[in-house]
Image (cartoon, grey):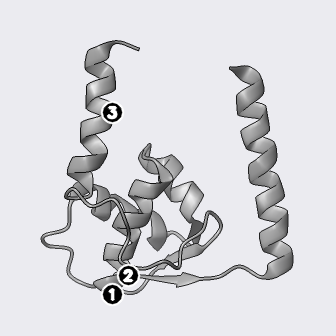
Amino acid sequence: MSPRRNERSLVRPHVVTGGRAHPTRNVFDLVTLVIAAGDLPRAGLSPEKLRIVELCRGGALSVAEIAGHLGLPVGVAKVLLSDLVDSGHLTTRATAPAAQQSKVRLLQEVLDGLRARL
C-alpha cells in the first residue's frame, strides 16, 4: 500500500465521524439488526448516513453488513449508526440468542476464510 493511500484511509474515517471515535450509544455489536424508522427528513445528513438509511429501508441489516456495504471499519459505522438512532432515522433490534450465536459462528468462518486468502 502506498503511503498516500494509507494516509487517505486514516483521514477518511476521522472526517466521516466528525473526529469522534466512539458512538453515543453502546448498543451495537456485529449482529445487532438496524432498521429504518420511517420517513424522516434527510436534509443535512452526510452521504454516508444517507446511504445507511437507504440500505436499511430495504429491511433489517446487521452492523457488520452495513459496515461492509459502506467499506468502512465497524467502529466508524457504529458512530454513524448511533447518530442516526439518536436522530430517530433508525431503530435497533437485538437478535435472538440462538440466531446471534449462529451469526457469530458464520462471521467467524468468514473471517477465517479471509485470513486464509491473505
Would residue 15 appear left or right of 39 to someone viewing this image?
left
According to the image, label 1 marks what residue? 88
Say few, some or many: other residues with alpha carbon within 10 Å of mark 1 (under 14 / 14 to 19 / 20 or more): some
According to the image, label 3 marks what residue? 9
According to the image, label 2 marks what residue? 85
Residue 117 location in percent, x, y? 73, 21
Say few, some or many: other residues with alpha carbon within 10 Å of mark 2 (under 14 / 14 to 19 / 20 or more): some
- Residue 39 in view of the camera: no
Residue 62 location in percent, x, y? 59, 65
* Residue kind at label 1, given as amino acid type: Gly
Would residue 68 appear left or right of 51 to someone viewing this image?
right
Alpha carbon distance from label 1 to label 2:
5 Å
The quadrant the N terminus occupies is: top left
Q: Is residue 89 above or below residue 77?
A: below
Q: Residue at x 83, y 68 (%)?
A: 101
Kind of element beneath mark 2 = helix
Q: Residue at x 44, y 64 (%)?
A: 78
Q: Residue at x 49, y 54 (%)?
A: 74
Disc 1 and disc 2 in contact, CB within 8 angstroms? yes
Residue 35 location in percent, x, y? 50, 78
Would residue 12 appear left or right of 32 to someone viewing this image?
left
Circle number at residue 28 = none
* Residue kind at label 3, given as amino acid type: Ser
Alpha carbon distance from label 2 to label 3:
26 Å
* Residue kind at label 2, given as amino acid type: Val
Q: Residue at x 38, y 81 (%)?
A: 85
Label whose residue precedes the other's in the sequence (3 or 1):
3
Residue 15 location in percent, x, y? 20, 49
Kind of element beneath mark 3 = helix
Say few, some or many: other residues with alpha carbon within 10 Å of mark 3 (under 14 / 14 to 19 / 20 or more): few
Alpha carbon distance from label 3 to label 1:
29 Å
